[in-house]
Amino acid sequence: MSAPSLTAIPVASRIQGFSYAIRNIVAEARKVEATGTRVRYLNIGDPIPFGFSTPAHLVEAVARAMRDGHNGYTASPGIAEAREIVAADFAARGVPVDADRVLLTSGTSEGIELALGALADEGDEVLVPTPTYPLYTAVLAKLRAKTVYYRTDPEHGWQPDLDDLRRLVGPRTRALVVIDPNNPTGAVYPDDTRRALIDLAETHGFPILADEVYGDLHYGGPVAPMASLAPDAAIISFSSLSKAYLAPGWRAGWLAVGRTPRLDGVLAGIKKLADGRLCSPGPMQYAIAAALSGPRDHQVAFRAELKARADLTTARLNAVPGMSCVAPRAAFYAMPRVMLPPGRTDEEFVLGLLRATGVLCVYGSGFGTDPAAGFFRVVFLASLDELGAIYDAMADFTAQFLRA
């Protein structure tokens, strides 16, 4: 046998453009923990570690499916019962869609990847808000497509800058991403803005990818799907059980492709790509039917808990000298801003905060903002008492950072 090669195995070049700051920063947190410091993880939007529980009827639906032997592969688009109930739920919210145009996915994330894979070739452009959920930019990097950021304005509640968006449309624009309610800012868009976004996309002939996973977590009650404003527009809608149904680890999501025949080719492409991954987790698909046809009382209590945390977060962070925070209106995220000294970056601030206090947030440039702008994302799922202690530590560190 010949001597083994000592040459490193090459990695695909597209990996260099793939980044997901929400997870990547955990490596730094592990180093801090290794020194004996307790880390308080405010980087990932997972309610379960903070004491929130998956509704019992969803747990029972999955357990029953397992006991009844539903542990093999399902049809690639998902089980018929769940697809039909997703379609019925969309219809009840003002979006008529046939169950054949619904696919069950491994969370919203897989749905996004399937849709982008069916829409964007190398060199194509997709309009993505900044700040954004970084999965979009990571997937586009993998596809060798181009992220074109459109601005959302913190001075106006993180609403999309429509003039900026119109300037960015080009001949290679293939889709417009709309995250509403928004991660990472907690913004909710009024219907006039949503109609303007639909009109823009329809005028130029590209679809909207409507990421609506937080639609039931608006503090004032559920937000209607974007497609309810224009059921014949080219809109692909995404949601899941992860957030409003408190089951993120189940990877139980869905997408619905609008009824317009203009999306028939895209639907066929999505289904073809979905065939290649076989199916989403089988037993968890049975929870989708239980969730959408069963009681939703837990959402009322969950929204009230989130509203209390949002109010505390906004008040406490706006009271920190050198810091400001737009009040979120949905979900469990805020995007505060620290007025950085010249030459400093958001990543320096976030890493300094982590090392000094054990509080882990995510720097804004991981969501596409300018590193010098000083934005960072906070996940405020911890208890009110815990958040109060966290914001005390954050205020003390910020004063020291700004004096340095």
Image (cartoon, grey):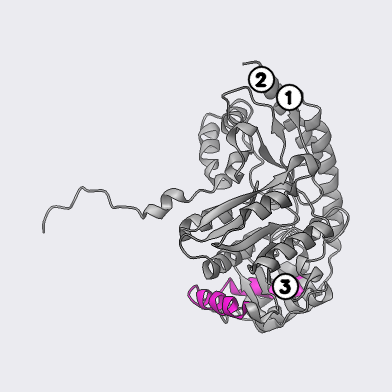
Q: Position of residue 142 (x, y in %)?
A: 47, 58
Q: Amino acid at mark 3?
A: Ala
Q: Amino acid at mark 1?
A: Gly
Residues marked 2 and 3 touching at CB (< 8 Å): no
Q: Nearer the viewer, residue 329 or 122?
A: 122
Give the extent of the magenta segment.
Answer: 263-291
Q: Residues within 10 Å of mark 1 (few under 14, many from 20)?
A: some
What's the magenta bit mostly, secondary-structure-wise?
Answer: helix
Disc 1 element: loop
Q: Residues within 10 Å of mark 3 (few under 14, many from 20)?
A: many
Above or below, comparing residue 387 to residue 173 in the picture: above
Disc 3 element: loop
Q: Position of residue 1 (x, y in %)?
A: 11, 59
Disc 2 target residue:
402
Residue at the outermost top position: 403
Disc 1 target residue:
322
Residues marked 1 and 2 touching at CB (< 8 Å): yes
Q: Is residue 397 magenta?
A: no
Mark 2 or mark 3, which is nearer to you?
A: 3
Q: Nearer the viewer, residue 237 or 208?
A: 208
Q: Nearer the viewer, residue 98 or 204?
A: 204
| Residue found 52% across the figure and 58% down from its top | 139
Above or below, comparing residue 289 to residue 111 in the picture: below
Q: Residues within 10 Å of mark 2 (few under 14, many from 20)?
A: some
The quadrant where residue 309 appears? top right
Of mark 1 and mark 2, the one earlier in the sequence is 1
